[in-house]
Image (spheres, helix red, strand yellow):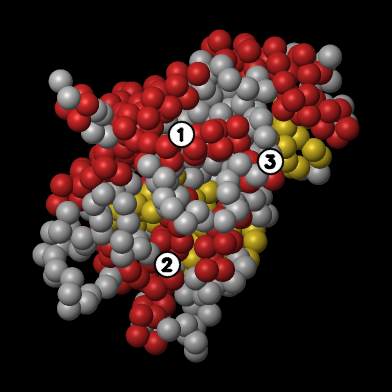
Amino acid sequence: MTRSEGADPRPELSAAFAHARRWLDGVAERPIPASRDAAQIAEAFPERLPARGTAPAEVVEDLVAAAEPGLMASQSPRFYGWVMGGTLPASLAADWLVSAWDQNAGMRDATPGVVAAEDAAARWLLQLLGLPADAAVGFTTGATMANFTGLAAGRDAVLASHGWDTAHDGLAGAPRIRVIAGQERHSSVDMALRYLGLGEPELVPSDAQGRIDPAALREVLAGVDGPAIVCLQAGNVHSGAFDPFEDPIAAAHEAGAWVHVDGAFGLWAAASPELHPLVAGMAGADSWATDAHKTLNVPYDCGVAVVADPVAMTRAFGHRAEYLIDAAVPDPHEHVPELSRRARGVPVWAALASLGSEGVRELVEGMAAAARGIAAGLAALPGASIVNDVVYTQVCVAFEDDATTTRVLERLLAEGEVRPSPSRWAGRGIIRISVSNWQTGEDDVARTVAAFERALG
């Protein structure tokens, strides 16, 4: 056998796979925080671009050596920071194929293989979440752009209902749109509104758990006499609480308003009969946004935007050019802000195919059960207070004073066994625990409580 016959034809892929496998095999037990900060990691990368290139396999080795000390083990079953999920095996494998296939998923007739997979994923999502079967679905970079997409459809729809064509006439001179949201909406809603030229929302009071006050909302809606959008929330980032949906949606529709639901991580409660009361009436809204990387655990990046009226979605994002194939049905690029994009819906299909509806139910209910277990364990620690009603996957804990809470968090981060994140809520410093990983189980609950106990001591 000659050297050429025995040589690895793709040494860079073999190297990448070996490093990926090593990372995944050890991620559950490695310290969660990065071992070096951004400035230290930057020193490992050459400041100037070399004149001569490097062999691909060597590039992989150099990248791993430089970057890995700066990686956070966010796939750990005891990673609870922000709201970041892990990665299901089938969705990770599908994501590798998406990169290898390198298809532009924006055009149906040009790349029918991945578009068909995304269509299937969209169909399953609507079934799973109990949303209208004929709704339009778009795959975005994340929940922020999913909110942007749903709100863009809503903006153009409510203006069209008042005789204004945004696509033709722009926003200058358009009737003012009143956007109404709860005080505890997520900042990504504000960002999306800013991108859309709609400014800051009018805020309606929320209760102690962050749920919008239906009576106060009705009072505001009574004064609406033009185009309006109401933003509701499925899953408060601190408490995990869900806005009531039935009465607010009915009131908004009576006022002629569009209703958008930000369900970045909470929309998935609809897949569980046990948790479904949290989303009762939610399917009556006009648009919904979620992030499949959070609760569904597909790789970054993958937001999902759903709009009940497909015409409203294509009104906002429809695009035609002479060099593009005129599809018999709307192209995927007519449902999102991007003309060209990777097939990020394919890992969603793989995740759903690997789990089935029962598997998704178990996934979501397992996260909620782990959150309740952690809350119960922490509540028994000296001086600890669980400051939210643990109805879903979020736990907020505080100790006697902010100084103690800060000290506990610092010790947790230094040890690296668990990784929550800090925040302020209801006027006090808290430690936020967001259970978002498919692997978090009873053992991780016990290890989490034990880590807090060590940090407190």
Measured as percent of width and height from the top left, residue 323 is found at 17, 74
Q: CA distance from mark 3 to mark 1?
A: 18 Å
Q: Earlier in the sequence, mark 2 or mark 1?
A: 1
Residue drawn at x 84%, y 28% as measured from the top left: 407
Q: Is residue 208 left or right of residue 321?
A: right
Q: Is residue 383 above or below residue 200?
A: above
Amino acid carrying label 3: it is Gln
Q: CA distance from mark 2 to mark 1?
A: 43 Å
Q: Secondary structure at mark 2?
A: helix
Callout 3: few (<14), some (14-19), or many (20+) C-alpha neighbours within 10 Å? Answer: few
Callout 1: few (<14), some (14-19), or many (20+) C-alpha neighbours within 10 Å? Answer: some
Amino acid carrying label 1: it is Glu
Amino acid carrying label 2: it is Ala
The residue that mark 1 highlights is 61
Q: Is residue 339 above or below residue 16?
A: below
Q: CA distance from mark 3 to mark 2?
A: 41 Å
> Does residue 186 show up?
yes
Mark number displayed over residue 40? 3
Determine whether label 3 and label 1 are within 8 Å by CB: no
Mark number displayed over residue 223? none
Residue drawn at x 27%, y 34% as measured from the top left: 10
Q: Is residue 310 above or below residue 81?
A: below
Q: Picture quarter containing residue 383?
A: top right
Q: Quadrant of the N terminus?
A: top left
Determine whether label 2 and label 1 are within 8 Å by CB: no
Callout 2: few (<14), some (14-19), or many (20+) C-alpha neighbours within 10 Å? Answer: many
**Residue 420 or residue 17, whichever sits in front:** 17
> Does residue 127 show up?
no
The residue that mark 2 highlights is 152
